[in-house]
Image: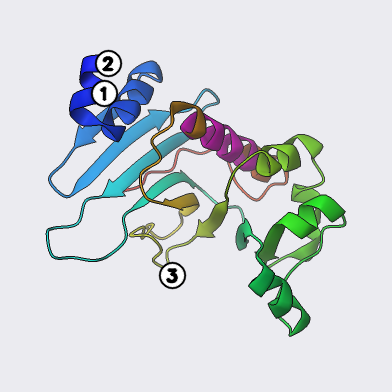
Amino acid sequence: MKLRSSVFGWKSVWMDLAEEMQGEFVDGTYVVSARLPLAIKPWVAHMKMHSHPIGKSIAETTVIAIPYIPQHEFKLAVHNSSPIEEVAKIFGLQDIIIGEPTFDKQFIIQGSNEQLLRELFAEATLRSAFLGQKSVNLSIVDHQHKLFGITPPRGVNVLTFAEKGAINSFERLTSVLDLMTQTIERLTHLEVATRDIAELD
């Protein structure tokens, strides 16, 4: 493993994760990807990192996506708060307060259904998983929108986590995957997502 780490760098972490989860790792010319079957079926996480050609200044981003079949439309975006955003709240930036002071202070939470968002984050274990992350940028992408290079087919939504740069920590990756698994399971419990198999190109 040490030899592989010295040769492949952060990619070795992705290789190790794919191997442990009995998934697939692909080191493409411009895109490095992994397909990871999660412990709870039928969920599959698709992890990608775009390696831009020389001369491009676009920042590289790790994107982890779990596709699912929605029961109805539901928009969600959660990311860390900042002093600038705290000021923006005062001036009307849409921000849903779920009623948990520590959580509300830490995150900007946006969505299309306030009641559903409150129910989603009523689960203490899920809130703890969010609070345990060093940074969060999680959202739901549908076929009408393209985000981080993800364009789902009609009838498929994608729970997406994005972070600038390569996530090069095994523990960090497994922690994010646990967060996403808890989130998609909660969405299923709230009848936002079905357990039907969803494909992502």
Label 2 residue SS: helix
Upstream in sequence: badge 1 or badge 3: 1
Gap between marks 2 and 3 measured at Cα: 44 Å
In the displayed structure image, the side of residue 121 where residue 139 appears, left or right: left
Q: Are marks 2 and 3 in contact (CB under 8 Å)?
A: no
User: Which quadrant of the structure image shows residue 83?
Assistant: bottom right
Residue named by callout 1: 5
Residue kind at label 2, given as amino acid type = Lys
**Residue at the spot 78% in from the left edge and 58% down from the top edge:** 104
Q: Main secondary structure of the magenta part?
A: helix
Q: Position of residue 49 (x, y in %)?
A: 30, 47
The mark closer to the camera, 2 or 3, is 2
Q: How far is disc 1 from disc 2 in space, using C-alphas? A: 5 Å
Q: From the image, tell me which residue sits under label 2.
A: 2
**Residue 100 visible (yes or no):** no
Closest to the observer, 7 or 73:
7
Residue type highlighted by circle 1: Ser
Q: Is residue 40 above or below residue 165?
A: above
- Taking depth in this image into account, of 44 and 9 the one nearest to the observer is 9
| Start-end of magenta stretch | 173-184
Of circles 1 and 3, the one toward us is: 1
Report how far apart the C-alphas of labels 1 and 3 lie in the structure: 39 Å
Q: Which mark is residue 144?
A: 3
142 vs 9, nearest the viewer: 9
* Relative image position of residue 53 (x, y in whole percent): 13, 58
Look at the image and tell me in which quarter the N terminus lies. top left
Seen at 49% across and 51% down, the residue is 160
- Tags 1 and 2 touching, CB below 8 Å: yes
